[in-house]
Amino acid sequence: MTESSKAAVLLDRTIVAVSGPDRVKFLQGLMTNDIRRLAPDKALYAGFLTGQGKLICDAFVLMDGDRILIDIATALVEDFVKRLTAFKLRATVEIGETAPALAVTAVWGPGAMEFVQYNRGAAISVIWSRRIGRECCCCGDHHRR
């Protein structure tokens, strides 16, 4: 029996975008990783800190053209955006959830990397939703594993 690649939308994750000419300088002082290492084909894992150095959340950070995307837990989005906005001061940046909303998806199984490479930049159909009892974002059905 051959197993194929599978994908699941991670419904408990949200993408926040930071754009504007000061985005790199602004985020450099707020996260634990060096944002200057960010590249179009490379994600960074980092923590975001308060002014006192306490951890707000951990996240994956990606470059998407003229904006930086931050993948964080949905439950933390409202507080996270509020805190970033408070640190904004005179920085020329815009902070908020992406519009239209982007989905975070996990892909695994044989050929998963090829699947991602082939579909890069394209809308990917969801094979099934990982969360039992939640509606699938693409078709509205309740999928079970």
Image: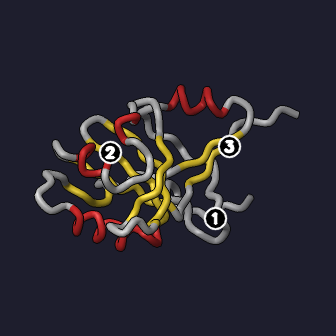
Question: Residue 77 in the image: x percent, y percent?
Answer: 39, 67
> Residue, x 61% and y 26% (percent of image)?
114
Disc assigned to residue 131: 1
The residue that disc 3 covers is 6
- The correct choice, above or below, for 109 with respect to 23 in the image is above
Residue that mark 2 sits on: 68
Helix or strand or loop: what does disc 2 sit on?
strand
Q: Nearer the viewer, residue 70 or 58?
A: 58
Nearer to me, 102 or 74: 74
Residue 103 lies, in percent from the top left, at 46, 52
Q: Position of residue 17 (x, y in %)?
A: 31, 52
User: Can you say whether 48 is above or below 41 in the image?
Assistant: below
Q: Secondary structure at mark 1?
A: loop
Q: Which circle's residue, 2 or 3, is located before the other in the chain?
A: 3
Q: For the residue labelled by badge 3, is the local secondary structure a helix, a strand or a loop?
A: strand
Image quarter hosting the N terminus? top right
Residue at left offset 36%, top offset 67%: 50
Q: Amino acid at mark 1?
A: Arg
In what quadrant of the picture does the C terminus appear? bottom right
Q: Horizontal and vertical percent for residue 124? A: 50, 40
Q: Is residue 105 above or below residue 38?
A: below
Is 118 positioned to the left or the right of 131 in the image? left
- In this rendering, would 68 be left or right of 142? left
